[in-house]
Image (cartoon, rainbow, N blue to C red):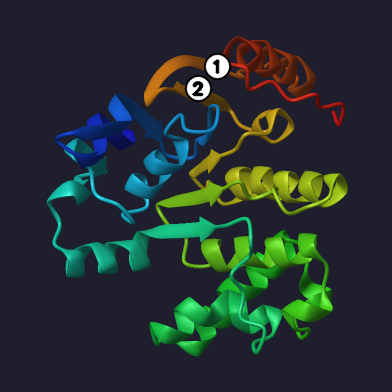
Amino acid sequence: MNDYIRICEVEKYYGNAANVTKAVDCVSFAVEKGEFVGVMGPSGSGKTTLLNLLATIDRVTAGHIYYEDTDITELSEDALSEFRKDNLGFVFQDYNLLDTLTIEENIVLALTLQEKPKKEILTACAQILKLLQIEDIRDQFPYQVSGGQKQRCACGRAMVNQPKLLLADEPTGALDSRSAQILLETFTDLNREMQATILMVTHDAFSASYCGRILFLQDGKIFHELVRGTKSRKVFLQEILDVLSLTGGVLSDERG
């Protein structure tokens, strides 16, 4: 299988010559199509900066990022904007939904703005609503539904265009434990049913245990990697906690 996304010796510095901060320090890894990858590390380890570089929100100082044959580090700002719109999906901690639109309208907004055929929009939306189990709230507004339902709507909006990569930044941070579990099971369903390629930044071991592979960052470098393989989620969770204990990032998590 060919690498779907390649991060090659990427570096990101902030500051000036007198006071330089290396947020990402010569990081290289690859993501296969259909992988669910987690990125973990203590505060200040570079995980959010790495996500922003992959999201084209920030630019690398050195190195290259390839989505299949496209080197996004070589694209102009206009080309990056188009690439982001056509290829990336985002799920944030604070939902970023429009309260004046229904759940269904929020999900299909991007397709509507792209002037896709109405039949295509309705088909895509119906598939997403069913997969995310939010068909019964399609005509409600974000302020009328729970935090977990809002976040599933945000997932639907991110996935309706079938992006090359779904980027999730602490997506369970604002959710209670039950809603977080439902959202993580939703990611698993998107990964399995739609072959969604997902990269999730999280500080939470419970959330990370749903991933197929975890990259651990410290001081801007990848210092460890875990692959779930055929292990149960409970066993994988314990392995994650063992690694986090080495970084001082351990969470006391009894949820699963």
Does 234 sit above or below residue 16?
above
Q: Identify which residue is drawn at 59% across, 44% down.
A: 191
Residue 225 screen position, x and y as percent: 49, 16
Q: Mark number for residue 216?
A: 2
**Can see residue 191?**
yes
Amino acid type, mark 1: Leu
What amino acid does circle 2 point to?
A: Phe
**How busy is the neighbourhood of tag 2: few (under 14 within 10 Å), some, or many (20 plus)?**
many
Q: Which residue is mark 1?
A: 226
User: Is the Cβ of the residue at disc 1 closer than 8 Å to that at disc 2?
Assistant: yes
Task: Look at discs 1 and 2 and give the one toward the viewer.
Answer: 2
Element on which disc 2 rests: strand
Residue at the (82%, 52%) spot, across then down: 179
The x, y position of residue 84, in whole percent, is 33, 62
Q: Residues within 10 Å of mark 1 (few under 14, many from 20)?
A: some
Q: Which quadrant of the figure contains the C terminus? A: top right
Q: Is residue 178 above or below residue 81?
A: above
Compared across the picture, whether 102 is left or right of 254 comes to left
Ranked by sequence position, the earlier of labels 1 and 2 is 2
Q: Position of residue 25 (x, y in %)?
A: 29, 26
Left/right of residue 49 with respect to residue 138 in the rendered view: left
